[in-house]
Image (cartoon, helix red, strand yellow):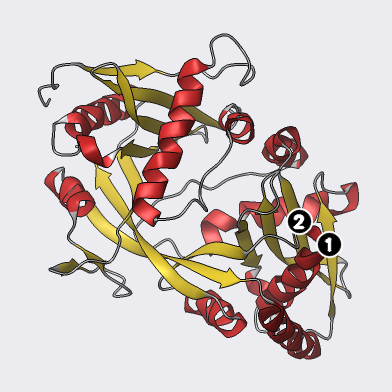
Amino acid sequence: MSPSPAGLELRPLPFPVSVDAPDACDFLEMVRVRNEVYREINGHDDESVEPAELLPMLRRQDYEIQLFWIVILDGEVVGRVAVDLPREEGSRVAFWRIELLRRVWSRGVGAAAYDLVEATAREHGRTVLQSWAAHPDAAGPSLEPPTGFGSIPVDHAARFYLARGYSLEQIERNSALDLTPRVLAHVREQLVEAERAAVDYRVVQWFLPTPPEFVPGYAWMKSRMVTDAPAAGMEFDEETWDAARLADHERPYLESGRTLQVTAALHVPTGGLAAFNELAVGRDRTQATYQEDTLVLKEHRGHRLGMLVKCAGLLSWADVAPASPRVLTYNAEENRPMLDINERIGFVPIAYNGAWKKVLS
């Protein structure tokens, strides 16, 4: 255990029933600091979120226990700690993050917060701790994951993980696409080419809630996200998705006013869904768009379905959120098939994250 600095409090954060509730003050401070931390890291506000949009996402507890603490130093909220515990039977994994304002780095705050993370994991019987961190480009020594794809600087965050016995397992690329008329014209050309290759498929689209006829296929594809996407040495539990779990996943979007569009490829001969892409934006549709999950089922690969659903989604998105300036997405650096599609569309890398793992004794 690391000695805690004087004036430090790690206060458990219960989630209020609404952002206007009398006990919402700590939650509002947590969101404010979260946004400030991401602004310090990224140099922009694309990852900022409004409290009313974040709260429904964090109150979901049926399939994952989400534990939060606010970090208070000398009476000021300066960060947050989170531990996510999947409820899959026999799960041994815990996902965590510690986010602190830069001005309190190197004062023992992160060390004390990490002691809380590890103690919480042990308390819940979890032995595989996993975490992601941004690693902005910097001069000096670098570190490569075992995949051989990408590298990160040995920066403040990397040294923090390494000192606690973590291994770098994977690099994740953050890419951006500016939604200009010229880009959309290029996307239209790519869609035409993809349609020529996808002769047995047609595009279907919907907004949440998912129409009943697409629930079984969409739920199955969501369950494949943790098994079919490249994970390197990171560990994920096999997930079972049914109509109830899909509804639980969609409910926060509907409650918060976020818009999520699903673009899918339907295999005409069988009537089953074969691929999908998600685009999401907050209530303020002038903010950045997030390309969330994208997947082509293994048995349907080789027909340019990834390009099909991505391009069809982007073109229709121009009517959904015409003032959204750009789309952000994340991919494993070794996921060359998906990166090839993104790069051909026009996405460019803007940042890299490290995926870190530690197995407790």
Q: Is residue 191 left or right of residue 345?
A: right
Q: Is residue 197 left or right of residue 105?
A: right
Looking at the picture, tell me which residue is in the foreground, 137 or 309.
137
Q: Which residue is mark 1?
A: 205
Give the residue type that dot 2 points to: Gln
The quarter of the rendered structure image containing the C terminus is: top left
Residue 335: x %, y % from top left: 47, 73
Q: Is residue 289 left or right of residue 76?
A: right
**Occupied quadrant, residue 276:** bottom right
Q: Which residue is mark 2?
A: 261
Q: Residue at x 75, y 90 (%)?
A: 193
The reply to whether residue 84 is in sight is: no
Dot 2: few (<14), some (14–19), or many (≥20) neighbours within 10 Å?
A: many
Separation of residues labelled 1 and 2 (CA atoms)? 7 Å
**Occupied quadrant, residue 112:** top left
Secondary element at image label 2: strand
Q: Earlier in the sequence, mark 1 or mark 2?
A: 1
Q: Are marks 1 and 2 in contact (CB under 8 Å)?
A: yes
The quarter of the rendered structure image containing the N terminus is: top left
Q: Is 75 above or below relative to 214?
A: above
